[in-house]
Image (spheres, rainbow, N blue to C red):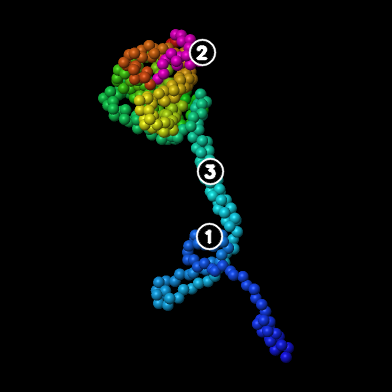
C-alpha cells in the first residue's frame, strides 16, 4: 500500500510542479575548424562536434553521427598562456644565441705571444696551414727553373739563419699552432727584394734581397720579421677582418665608388707590421742575433724605397722611419756587430 502511495505522489508532483527554464544558447555544429572552436570557447557556447563519415556511408545511408561536448575555459587564461609561450620561445632563442657567441669567443679569442694582444679569429689553425701550403705550391709552380738547389750557398745561408730562429721558437711557450710544422725554404733567383713566411712554415726569399742585405744579422732581421707574422697568426686575423668588414666594403662600392676602399685596411696593416717588428726583435735575441740591427735594416729599406727592386716589398710595409721610432729605445742605438 505504501508503495502505491509513493508512486502516485511522485506522478502528482511531477504533473503540477511549475518549471522555470532559461533559454540556452543553441550548440554550434563544427567540424575540424579551429577558428570556430576558439570562438565557442571564448563565448562559453556549447559545441556540437560532428564526426565525419566516409563518402560511401554518407551516400548510402545519409546518416551522420553527432554529439555534444561543452568547453568552459576562461579566455583570459588562454591569452596569458599564449603570451607566456611566445616569451619562452624568445628567451630560449636568446639563450642559445648567447651560448653560441660565448663559445666562439672563448674558443677563438687568442692571445698573441710576446705582444699579449688578444684577437678574434674565425679561421682555425688547420685551415690556415692549408692556405699557406697551397700558396707555397703555387709559388713553386710559378718559379719553376728559378728555384735554387739545396746545395747553393744562398740556400744554405737562408737555411742556417732559419734553423736558429726555429730553435728560438721551441724555447717559447704558447705556440701550439706552430707545433708539428714542416718548415721549408724556397730561394728564388730573382732581382726583386722580396721575402715572406707563409702559414705552415714556408719561407720564400728572393736573391735580390740577399744581395741588398749581405750579412746574416740583416737577413735574420728580415726572416724574424716574416716569421713573426706566422707567430701572431696575422693571416687568420686578416681573413677574419675582411669577413667582418665586407658590408662596409659593399657600402663604399655602391654609394662611394670614387673613394679608395684600401684606406680602410691601411691602419690595420700598419699595426700588424709594427707588431711583427716587436716580435721579430725578441726572436732575434732568442736566436742569438743582435736586435740592434733591425733599425739599420729599416733605414736601409727606407732609403732604397725608390729603387725598383724594393718597390713591391716596401709598398706592403709602413715607412721605415715610423717603424724605427716605435722600436724600443735600447734597440735604436744601432752599432757595429759581427756576423
Q: Which residue is mark 3?
A: 94
Q: Position of residue 44 (x, y in %)?
A: 58, 63
What is the distance, in whole Å, between disc 1 and disc 3 at their CAs?
A: 31 Å
What is the distance, in whole Å, between disc 3 and disc 2 at their CAs?
A: 50 Å
Q: Which of 303 and 89 lies nearest the eye of the viewer?
A: 89
- In the rendered structure, which disc, 1 or 3, sits on the residue that comes first in sequence? 1
Q: Which of 262 and 224 lies nearest the eye of the viewer?
A: 262
Residue that appears at 56% across and 65% down: 45
Q: Which of 249 and 213 lies nearest the eye of the viewer?
A: 249
Residue that appears at 50% across and 33% down: 109
Can residue 44 be seen by looking at this rendering? Answer: yes
Q: Which residue is mark 2?
A: 329
Image quadrant assignment for residue 263: top left
Q: Which residue is mark 1?
A: 38
Q: Which of 195 and 220 lies nearest the eye of the viewer?
A: 195
Can residue 245 be found in the magenta stretch?
no
- In the rendered structure, which disc, 3 or 2, sits on the residue that comes first in sequence? 3
Q: Secondary structure at mark 1?
A: helix
Q: Residue furthest top?
A: 336
Q: How many marks?
A: 3
Residue that appears at 37% across and 25% down: 259
Image: magenta residue range: 317-336
In the image: residue 72, left or right of residue 29: right
Amino acid at each position: 500500500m505504501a508503495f502505491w502511495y509513493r508512486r502516485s505522489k511522485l506522478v502528482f508532483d511531477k504533473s503540477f510542479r511549475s518549471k522555470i527554464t532559461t533559454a540556452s544558447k543553441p550548440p554550434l555544429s563544427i567540424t575540424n575548424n579551429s577558428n570556430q572552436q576558439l570562438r565557442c570557447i571564448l563565448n562559453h557556447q556549447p559545441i556540437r562536434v560532428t564526426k565525419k563519415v566516409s563518402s560511401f556511408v554518407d551516400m548510402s545511408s545519409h546518416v551522420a553521427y553527432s554529439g555534444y561536448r561543452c568547453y568552459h575555459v576562461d579566455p583570459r587564461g588562454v591569452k596569458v598562456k599564449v603570451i607566456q609561450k611566445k616569451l619562452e620561445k624568445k628567451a630560449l632563442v636568446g639563450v642559445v644565441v648567447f651560448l653560441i657567441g660565448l663559445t666562439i669567443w672563448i674558443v677563438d679569442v687568442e692571445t698573441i705571444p710576446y705582444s699579449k694582444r688578444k684577437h678574434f679569429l674565425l679561421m682555425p689553425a688547420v685551415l690556415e696551414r692549408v692556405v699557406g701550403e697551397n700558396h707555397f705550391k703555387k709559388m713553386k709552380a710559378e718559379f719553376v727553373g728559378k728555384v735554387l738547389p739545396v746545395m747553393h750557398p744562398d740556400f744554405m745561408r737562408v737555411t742556417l739563419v732559419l734553423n736558429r730562429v726555429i730553435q728560438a721558437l721551441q724555447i717559447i711557450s704558447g705556440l701550439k699552432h706552430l707545433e708539428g710544422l714542416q718548415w721549408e725554404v724556397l730561394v728564388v733567383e730573382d732581382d726583386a727584394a722580396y721575402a715572406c713566411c707563409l702559414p705552415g712554415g714556408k719561407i720564400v726569399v728572393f736573391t735580390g734581397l740577399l744581395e741588398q742585405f749581405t750579412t746574416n744579422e740583416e737577413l735574420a732581421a728580415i726572416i724574424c720579421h716574416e716569421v713573426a707574422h706566422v707567430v701572431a697568426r696575422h693571416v687568420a686575423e686578416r681573413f677574419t677582418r675582411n669577413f667582418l668588414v665586407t658590408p662596409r666594403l659593399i657600402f663604399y662600392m655602391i654609394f662611394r665608388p670614387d673613394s679608395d676602399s684600401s684606406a680602410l685596411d691601411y691602419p690595420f696593416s700598419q699595426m700588424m707590421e709594427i707588431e711583427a717588428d716587436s716580435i721579430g726583435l725578441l726572436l732575434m735575441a732568442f736566436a742569438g742575433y743582435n736586435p740592434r740591427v733591425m733599425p739599420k735594416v729599416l733605414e736601409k729599406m727606407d732609403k732604397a724605397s725608390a729603387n725598383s727592386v724594393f718597390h713591391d716589398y716596401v709598398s706592403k710595409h709602413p715607412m721605415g722611419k715610423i717603424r724605427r721610432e716605435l722600436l724600443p729605445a735600447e734597440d735604436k742605438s744601432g752599432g757595429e756587430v759581427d756576423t
